[in-house]
């Protein structure tokens, strides 16, 4: 039987409570933790934990952090960081890789998210400041870009506000629309992916339903964070990210150091 890992969960609300109650971890204070699971909107405290030798798994996008400071902190504390922000695109990225194997050259991707939100408690939509939310979608665009295209765009993501949410674009080839409602939807979370190539446009839709009373968006975040804890502990010091180099739909728990 695997010994539960001492973990500090930084954050409040249903998601933090669910993670702290998981049997594979023992929730405690940061001073006695091997890993910190970071769920707050403030990334300023992350470097201090890394310098103190604690590995950190954060739900923030990597782009929201001061990377030079993070790298210095990892070296000082011989610690490891994984930033899981942009998780919303993980399923779509896997599907994109699978479609890319048969669609030859992909020219455009459009991802649509339909999410029905309660009044509070779903990370990050109604738990982080509104001006921080686009960063998660921008990170999601980069995840999709890495999954589908051999080159990285020099363009910056752009936010287009809409009445029922927002659309986020990265140049002409990537779009990520979020449509948000408040109560009453039969499906609380749905992703629609359209991938265009010279052969035409392939589309797929994935529906997510509540798991044990938890909103599917929070469940996806919980799974992403907890799956990263073990590999982060096993990795050398530095920043690690999820490996997207697969073209078929299997569970992929690998975390690799990105190329510099």
Image (spheres, rainbow, N blue to C red):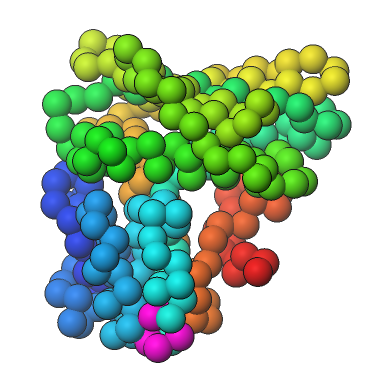
Residue 114 shown left or right of residue 5 in the figure: right
Q: Nearer the viewer, residue 160 or 200?
A: 160
Residue 93 to residue 253: above or below? above
The residue sitting at 35% across, 59% down in the picture is 58
Q: Which residues are magenta?
A: 73-77
Q: Position of residue 62 (x, y in %)?
A: 44, 57
Q: Residue 68: where, in percent of width, then height?
A: 45, 72
Q: Nearer the viewer, residue 226 or 168?
A: 168
Residue that appears at 66% across and 26% down:
172
Image coords of residue 21 (percent x, y): 19, 57
Side of 36 where 71 appears, left or right: right
| Dominant secondary-structure state across the stretch colored magenta | helix
- Residue 221 position, x and y percent, is 36, 46
In the rendered structure, does residue 48 fall within the stretch colored magenta? Answer: no
Q: Quadrant of the C terminus?
A: bottom right
From the viewer's perspective, tell me whether residue 187 is left or right of residue 103: left
């Amino acid at each position: 039987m695997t010994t539960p890992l001492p973990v500090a969960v930084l954050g409040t609300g249903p998601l933090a409570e669910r993670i702290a109650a998981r049997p594979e971890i023992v929730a405690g204070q940061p001073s006695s933790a091997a890993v910190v699971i970071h769920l707050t909107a403030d990334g300023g405290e992350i470097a201090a934990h890394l310098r103190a030798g604690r590995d950190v798994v954060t739900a923030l996008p990597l782009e929201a952090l001061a990377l030079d400071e993070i790298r210095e902190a990892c070296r000082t504390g011989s610690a490891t960081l994984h930033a899981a922000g942009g998780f919303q695109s993980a399923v779509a990225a896997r599907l994109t890789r699978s479609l890319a194997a048969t669609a030859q050259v992909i020219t455009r991707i459009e991802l649509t998210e339909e999410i029905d939100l309660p009044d509070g408690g779903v990370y990050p939509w109604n738990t982080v400041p509104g001006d921080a939310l686009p960063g998660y979608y921008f990170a999601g665009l980069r995840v999709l870009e890495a999954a589908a295209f051999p080159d990285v765009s020099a363009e910056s993501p752009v936010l287009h506000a809409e009445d029922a949410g927002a659309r986020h674009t990265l140049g002409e080839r990537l779009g990520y629309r979020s449509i948000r409602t408040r109560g009453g939807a039969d499906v609380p979370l749905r992703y629609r992916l359209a991938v265009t190539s010279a052969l035409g446009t392939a589309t797929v839709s994935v529906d997510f339903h509540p798991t044990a009373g938890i909103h599917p968006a929070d469940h996806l975040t919980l799974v992403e964070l907890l799956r990263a804890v073990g590999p982060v502990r096993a990795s050398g010091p530095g920043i690690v990210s999820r490996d997207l180099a697969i073209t078929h739909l299997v569970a992929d728990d690998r975390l690799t150091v990105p190329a510099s």
